[in-house]
Image (cartoon, rainbow, N blue to C red):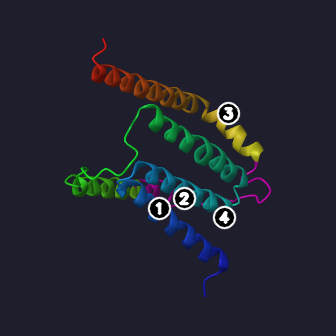
Amino acid sequence: MPSALAVVFWVLSLLAVGSALLVVTTRHLVHAALWLVVTLGSVAGLFLLLAAEFVAWVQVLIYVGAVVVLLLFALMLTRAPTGPQPDLTVRRALPAAVAAGLVGVLLVATVVAGFRDVRLELDEAVVGTAEVTGDTIFRMWVLPFEVLSVLLLAALVGAIVLSRMRGAAERGDD
């Protein structure tokens, strides 16, 4: 008989995988963003099961709150079609699924090969605390974090510029 923790884990895992599949298969961009909220919320629940409360709340506040809002904001600013897109084709779905499967197998093989004999002794009082997480982020990961933030900002500015240029070309302005 599985424990309640195992049942919650499997429910959240299946919800995360199912909603992630809906993110990439739906033809409606706003629905895809809302399924992304479900996916990220499920991942936050999995972090809670791992006793990483701080990371779970960061997941909810930053990814669910800020990134999805930024995504919807970018959709509105770029005048992207937000309704259903019936003209989207699925002719590249099979190669994309094969590539995703190969990347998944490679990732699993890499993690298994790299951590096969590693056993972590976790101190219950330290795992997932804000002190440990902040120390790790600001000592080891500050440069990649800042590079990613600049990249996201550049992508948003580029999308706005491209949409404005397309709008001016449609109106006949220079």
Q: Position of residue 41 (x, y in %)?
A: 59, 57
169 on left or right of 36:
left
Question: Residue farthest to the right?
Answer: 125
Disc 2 target residue: 38
Q: CA distance from mark 4 to mark 3?
A: 24 Å
Q: CA distance from mark 2 to mark 4?
A: 17 Å
Q: Which mark is residue 19?
A: 1
Q: CA distance from mark 1 to mark 2?
A: 6 Å
Label 4 or label 3, whichever comes before in sequence order: 4
Q: CA distance from mark 4 to mark 1?
A: 19 Å
Looking at the picture, does residue 85 appear above or below residue 141? Answer: below
Q: CA distance from mark 3 to mark 2?
A: 29 Å
Label 3 or label 2, whichever comes before in sequence order: 2
Classify mark 1: helix, strand or loop.
Answer: helix
Give the quadrant of residue 173. top left
Circles 1 and 2 in contact, beta carbons < 8 Å? yes
132 on left or right of 37:
right
